[in-house]
Structures are given as C-alpha cells and as structure tokens.
C-alpha cells in the first residue's frame, strides 16, 4: 500500500515537472529527407518514441506468448536451401551430361556445400574442371571433397588417380594407386587403373606381379591375361641385355640372359615367341653353340616347325652331329618342308652340296617358299649350274610373285631397243 502511494506521488511529481517544462519551452525538431520535411516539438517526438517502444515491446511479448517455435523458422530456411541446392545439382548434372563443362562446374560447385550428397557434387565438378584443362580447380574440388567427406577418402583417391592418369602424370598416379592397393587389394577400379598405368609406364615387372590379382578378381578375360603375361615376359627378356652397362663382360651378359630365362614361369618356357627371342639374343651374343643345344632340346620336347627352321640357321660346335640329329627327326617328320630346308642348310655347312640341292628341291616340292628358292638358287649360282639356276629362278618368280597384279609388260625386242 505504501509502495503504491509512493509510486503514485513520484508519477504525479514527474508529470507536473514535465508539464511545466513543456509549457516553458516546447522545443523544435525538423526532420528533412529528400523533398519531405517533418516539423514537431521535441516533447511530441519523445512521446512518439516512447509509445513506439512500448508498442514494439508489447508486440514481441505477444509473439512470445503465441509460442511460434524458432526451430521451425530455421528448418524452413534449411529446407529452402536444400531445395535450391538440389535444383542446382540437377542442372549441373544435366550440363555435365551435355558436355557443358563450365556450367556443370559452376552449378555443382555452388550447390556442393548444401547438397544432399556433397561428395558427388565435388567429384563431378572436379571432372568438369579437368575437362576444361583447369587442373588447379579440379584439385581444389577434390580437396574440398576430402575435407567434407573424410569417410569417403577412397572414392576421392580413386578420382584423384583417374585425373592424374588423364593428365599423363603416370608416376604420381602410380603412387596414389599403390597406396590404395595396399588398403584395398581387391578393389576392381584400383586394379584396372593400375593395369593401365603400369602399361603406360612400361613397367613390365610390375605388370607381371599384378597379373595374379587381375586373374583372381576377374578384371580381364583369361585370353587377355595370357596375352598380357606373355608380353610382360617377352619385354623383360628383350630388355635384359639393354639394361646392362656397356662395359659389362661377355660372360656376365650371358649369365644375366640365362637368369632372365630361368625366371620365366614354367608354362611359358615352351612358348614359341619366347624361345625365339631367347635364341635370338644368344646369337646376338655370338653364342650359337649354346643356342643350338637349347633349341635342340626344345624341338625334342615339343615339335615346332618355326623352331626347326631356326635350327638350320645355327652353327653348333659339331656341325656333323647337328646334321645327324636333324636326319633322325626326318624319320618322324618326313613331310616337313621346314625340316627339309634345315637339312639342306646343315648339308651346306658340311659341304654336302648335292645332298643340299636334293633337300632344297624336296622342300620346294612339298611347300614352295621364297626362302627355299633363295637357298637353292644361291647354291646353284656358286656351283656354276646356270641353266638350273635360270629354271629355278623362273619357278621362284612364278611362285613368290603369284599375288602380283596383272600389268602390261614390254615386248622383248622393244625392251632391248630401249
């Protein structure tokens, strides 16, 4: 009661004091904006300000009592942002599908922070930037993807490796993929990229080591894997001597070549192309005698016409014994044109000229070949058998030139006069 009376007295006193002041000096306030002016007394302006404050306070209290949850406002704002991000993402993906790389990069990059799947936005935006040659932007998008989705580091690393491969950064790509393979040894995309990267680098040893994983995880068809395996070991065998320093001693070179052959998988040691490569490198080193022994064993285990033909080109330690070995093969393969050609050559090494002519003629009768005709004609020329030589030359031209087009030829007399 006393407090209410005291408050009333204070209000009355304040009102009387303010009333006296307003009468003594009402004040003057001028507000001007553009061409509009407002004139009023100071006390009226203060009253308007006070009333405005009270009204605003009252409005806020009413809103508070209405219990409108602020979380709803926040959720509405978030849903709106998500819808915008979704719309931009769809536009970006459509642009990417149409090949409009700059649009795809722009829309996907803008939508990524609010996208439902930001990883997709960042990865596709990185690819769009890459297509425009903007490597820096592509790397930035990948870095953002890694920061935003650390749980998807594998997907980002694979995308990084793919971009490095497309840029021709094969060494960097190999480093990225090697780290991935250590964590995910059976990941098909990692294995595919590793296969392509190692092929580009010409790392045949690495490819050979990768083949078991490619086969186990069915990354390539078996036929392709077999061809790849053969190529790897042919390349490794073919580069054996080239990798040695020029000053390497002869015997060391031979030993290195032999080790390379011994390191081949057993199933490939009978492959014709590998055998031919090995023999060729032995002969390059001047090791015909070793090549003859090796090739003799190969032919004994697995008859092969190509190897038999090569055998006739080699000069073993004992040419007479070499000829006798080939004669024994004739019993089991009497109709082999390749063997008869080889017998003719080995007969020449032993200076059995008549027998050599016979073998060459038999080979031609079974299967005419330019090689057999060339050997026979060369021998006939050195023996002075010019008539036979002319006949065989004509036969050889008719045989080897069978595929020539039908063209007009000059008359003999006209040719002589010209």
Image: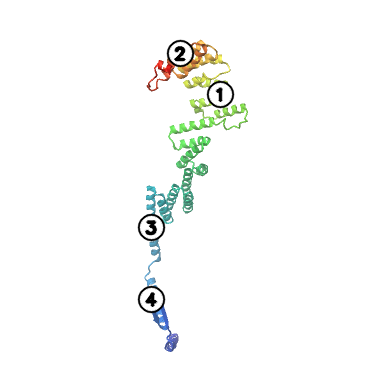
Quick one: label 2 or label 1, which is nearer the N terminus? 1
| Residue 343 is at least partly visible in this image | no
Mark whose residue sits in front, 3 or 1:
1
* Disc 4 from disc 3: Cα separation: 42 Å
Total numbered labels placed on residues in the image: 4
The local crowd at label 4, few if under 14, some if 14 to 19, many if 20 or more residues have their Cα within 10 Å, is few
Say which residue appears at 53% left-offset and 25% top-offset: 280
Q: Element type at marker 2?
A: helix
Locate residue 12, reporting x and y percent.
42, 88
- Residue identified by numbered label 1: 283
Quick one: label 4 or label 3, which is nearer the N terminus? 4
The image quadrant that residue 290 belongs to is: top right
Are the residues flagged by discs 2 and 4 in contact, CB closer than 8 Å?
no
Q: Which mark is residue 390?
A: 2
- Residue identified by numbered label 3: 84
| Residue 370 is at least partly visible in this image | yes
Quick one: label 2 or label 4, which is nearer the N terminus? 4
Locate residue 305, reporting x and y percent.
47, 20
* Disc 3 from disc 1: Cα separation: 74 Å
The image quadrant that residue 116 belongs to is: bottom left
The local crowd at label 3, few if under 14, some if 14 to 19, many if 20 or more residues have their Cα within 10 Å, is some
Q: Element type at marker 4?
A: loop
Quick one: label 3 or label 1, which is nearer the N terminus? 3
* Disc 2 from disc 1: Cα separation: 34 Å
């Amino acid at each position: 009661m006393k407090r209410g009376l005291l408050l009333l007295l204070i209000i009355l006193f304040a009102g009387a004091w303010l009333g006296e002041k307003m009468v003594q000096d009402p004040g003057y306030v001028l507000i001007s904006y553009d061409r509009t002016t407002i004139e009023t007394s100071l006390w009226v302006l203060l009253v308007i300000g006070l009333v405005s404050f009270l009204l605003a306070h009252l409005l806020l209290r009413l809103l508070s009592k209405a219990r409108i949850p602020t979380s709803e406002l926040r959720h509405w704002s978030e849903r709106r942002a998500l819808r915008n991000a979704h719309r931009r993402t769809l536009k970006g993906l459509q642009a990417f599908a149409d090949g409009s790389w700059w649009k795809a990069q722009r829309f996907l990059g803008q939508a990524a922070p609010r996208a439902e799947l930001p990883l997709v936005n960042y990865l596709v935006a990185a690819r769009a930037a890459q297509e425009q040659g903007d490597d820096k932007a592509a790397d930035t998008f990948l870095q953002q993807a890694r920061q935003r989705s650390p749980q998807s580091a594998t997907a980002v690393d694979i995308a990084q490796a793919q971009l490095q491969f497309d840029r021709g950064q094969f060494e960097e790509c190999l480093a990225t993929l090697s780290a991935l393979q250590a964590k995910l040894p059976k990941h098909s995309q990692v294995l595919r990229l590793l296969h392509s990267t190692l092929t580009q680098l010409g790392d045949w040893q690495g490819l050979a080591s990768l083949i078991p994983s490619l086969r186990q995880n069915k990354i390539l068809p078996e036929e392709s894997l077999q061809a790849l395996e053969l190529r790897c070991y042919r390349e490794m065998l073919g580069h054996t001597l080239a990798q040695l320093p020029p000053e390497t001693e002869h015997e060391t070179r031979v030993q290195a070549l032999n080790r390379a052959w011994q390191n081949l998988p057993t199933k490939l040691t009978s492959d014709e192309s590998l055998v031919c490569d090995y023999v060729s490198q032995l002969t390059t080193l001047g090791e015909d005698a070793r090549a003859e022994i090796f090739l003799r064993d190969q032919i004994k285990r697995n008859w092969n016409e190509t190897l038999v033909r090569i055998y006739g080109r080699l000069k073993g330690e004992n040419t007479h014994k070499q000829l006798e070995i080939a004669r024994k093969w004739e019993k089991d393969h009497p109709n082999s044109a390749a063997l008869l050609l080889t017998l003719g050559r080995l007969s020449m090494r032993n200076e059995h000229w008549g027998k050599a002519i016979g073998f060459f003629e038999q080979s031609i009768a079974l299967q005419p070949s330019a090689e057999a005709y060339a050997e026979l004609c060369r021998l006939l020329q050195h023996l002075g058998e010019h008539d036979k030589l002319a006949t065989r030359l004509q036969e050889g031209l008719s045989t080897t030139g069978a595929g020539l087009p039908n063209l007009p030829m000059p008359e003999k007399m006209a040719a002589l006069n010209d």
